[in-house]
Image (spheres, rainbow, N blue to C red):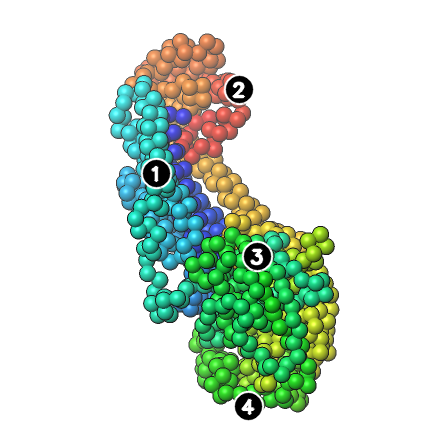
Amino acid sequence: MTPRQVATLAAEITLAALTVTVFVSLERLFVDTAYLGPVLVLAVASHVVATTTRRFGLGTGVSALISGAAFVLVFTSVLYPDTAAAIFPTSETLDLLGNDLRDAWSIFTDQSAPAESAVGFTATIGVAAWLVAFLADWAAFRLMSPIEAIAPATAIFVFGALMGLERNNLIHAMVFAGAVAAVLLAMRAERQVREETWAAAGSRQGISTTLRVGGASAAIAVLAGTLAGPLLPGSQDDAIVDFHEITSGAESRTVVSPLVEISTSLIQQSNFEIFSVAVDESEKDYWRLMALNSFDGNVWRRSSSFDDVRGPVGSDIDPAIKRRSLTQTITTRRLGNIYLPAAYEVSNVIDSGGIDLEYEESTGALVVKKHDESAAGAGFTYVIESLVPDFDPADLPAVATSGLDPEFVRENTALPRACGDNESAASDACWPNSVTALAQQVTAGATSDHERALMLQNFFLDPVKFTYDLEVARHDNVKGVEQFLFEVRRGYCQQFSSTFAAMARSLGIPARVAVGFTWGEWDDSRNEYVVRGRNAHAWPEVYFAGAGWVAFDPTPGRARPHDSDITGLQEAQLGVNDGENQGVAATPTTAPPATTRAPLSSGIDDDPASGSGFSGLRTPTDTADSSSTSASDSSGGIPSWVAWLGWSTLLIVAASLTVPAVRAVRRRRLISRVQGDPLAVAELAFDDAVGALSLLDLRYEAHETPLEFEQRARNSSPDSITGLHELVRSVTVLRYGQPSDPTSAAIDAQEAAEQVIQLCHTIAGREKVLTRFLDPRRLSPVG
């Protein structure tokens, strides 16, 4: 490769690396990295298309059109393959994209970062990645402007830094600075060669010097900034005000809802140990994190406040209820949130492990105080006592709200306004009357609210009506509830618990969604329960006057220990009785049958047992469960990393095959143009031979005649180049003489050129010939 080719290739690679770096840094916006695979495929594809069209010599306008067409095909293939016709989008693709974008907008307006990496976010970031790559290539190699080349990526990086969590900031800043320095350095070297600052003979050494000195300087600058920056005065101060804190009080903080993180724990951290609980083996329980008690039609959220805690804490359960004491020594391993697991209900913090804690009585949530989040995230051990209620059906009043404060009832039965005429849950975020009607049908004939809750629970446990499945859209809004009940009929604990709670509220029964973990696996050697991501779970709780919050479990294959009197279910979790609790006798209902529809894609790996999926994310402490049903349903599926690797490989192969295809088209055009012109035929044969000779580092100079080139080739090559003399003689005769038979001379030139080409290919070897054949930089009609 020539010095200019080396410099241009280096600039292209560093520019692509900058794009990748920037979009990796957006992980601070999300609780998982499910977005990253598709986005990186789109970013790299955009760079490949931009590079290829530019090297083909196509103008900006034509390149933009080709890039746009390629984007549509790659975008559809990567994000919506199930809706595509081959690789082309369909009306179903557009409909699903519209739904995903609306869902993403709903999450964006209702939640602070980090949020779930919904497909709508992935699609939006994918569009941005494609545009950033195309604009960067355009600015770098068409405008020849380094500043404009890094500007699009810089804008995305700043956006991520402002909107995302303060997570891995130093690492992201260091890598970004290094990537920018590499781009600027590579572009300087490319410009240096292009303008021929040094004489041709010394240009390679000049580039080498520039890269070495510039690279060392950039590395020193980045390292110095990384080491010295945190030591500067004020470096620990917040650079940006969190606007959520302005409206929520000085001690408020942006915290990820555990319900948002359900799929991350359940799927992507299924085999990771999250924490362990040292108790007697018989004292297993659900290890609860918190409860979400407010539903606005878009998301479930918590709406209460915390108080400092040391020693005993208050209770939200009626003191008349029988309770058992349970002391737990809990050691955290991979907490990604502030909520701490504990059996419900915490009564006393015996030892906080040196970490300052807070407690929220109304939701039973024990949390780490803001200033100790980093220390707690590294793992610690705390000891607590819980007084676990042992509810008896006789303790529960026939009417759950009997004698309760009306304001409490209003808050815990609140739903969005009912849909009016010509309104729909999907477009108006109103409560669908059809869901209330279904809840009334399911509970028809019940004589108490406890019986109504049981009927709702068993309705979801009927395997004829519902199926446990991880591969579904992760929506808790009213549209998601409606789709879950009447169309999809598939889901995991997030859908089952949130839909149960919303339906109970539609009947006037106070309900909320609790989030935590099932008890995990007993480890004899450690004498404790080991809780992993696959044990994450969510379940509904119903409030009964004179008792408190009572847990139910509508998720197939799950049931809390010691609750059979209330729920009628035997304890169950992943791998333990998880085939039970399905087919529980449910009250007959006239609910409409589920329509035949494929489950909506979640865009992530659906095998919880594999532990696969994109790694490198913080494991949350708070989320849902995994099921043997889902594992078996998804067995045989392609892991997500394999899918992305496959698409990337296919893209590279397609790009490589584009070069010979274009070469063949151009070759055919050239042959058609020279038909009937002996001199043009001979000149084309000469060009073919010259191209083949370049494989041996013999390059034809524009100022040379064919005879001068032949003489130089003879002096440079120790071996005789068969056919070169005959080729040069034929071309020279046709150029400068008047042969009696020009056609014969042209044929002689073609035959001689073929001999030269075959010899050069033999000497150069197959690998070098193939590399040349696939190289888009050499699209002249060579052999």
* Mark 3 → mark 4, Cα distance in angstroms: 41 Å
Identify residue for label 1: 224
Disc 1 is placed on an element classified as: helix
In the rendered image of this protein, does residue 449 appear above or below residue 313?
A: below
Kindly identify which residue carries mark 4.
Answer: 403
Q: Inspect the image, locate mark 3, and give the three-letter code of the amino acid beneath it.
A: Thr
Image quarter where the N terminus lies is top left
Is residue 387 toward the left or the right of residue 2 in the image? right
Q: CA distance from mark 4 to mark 1?
A: 67 Å
Q: Residue at 70% across / 72% down in the picture?
A: 562
Q: Which of the two residues, 86 or 558, is positioned nearer the viewer here?
A: 558
What x and y, as percent, mark residue 286?
Answer: 63, 67
Q: State whether residue 32 appears in this view.
A: no
Q: Is residue 764 above or below residue 74?
A: above
- Dot 4: few (<14), some (14–19), or many (≥20) neighbours within 10 Å? few
Mark 1 vs 3: CB contact within 8 A: no
- N-terminal of the two: label 4 or label 1? 1
> Marks 3 and 2, how far apart in space?
70 Å
Given residues 359 and 579, the one toward you in this image is: 359
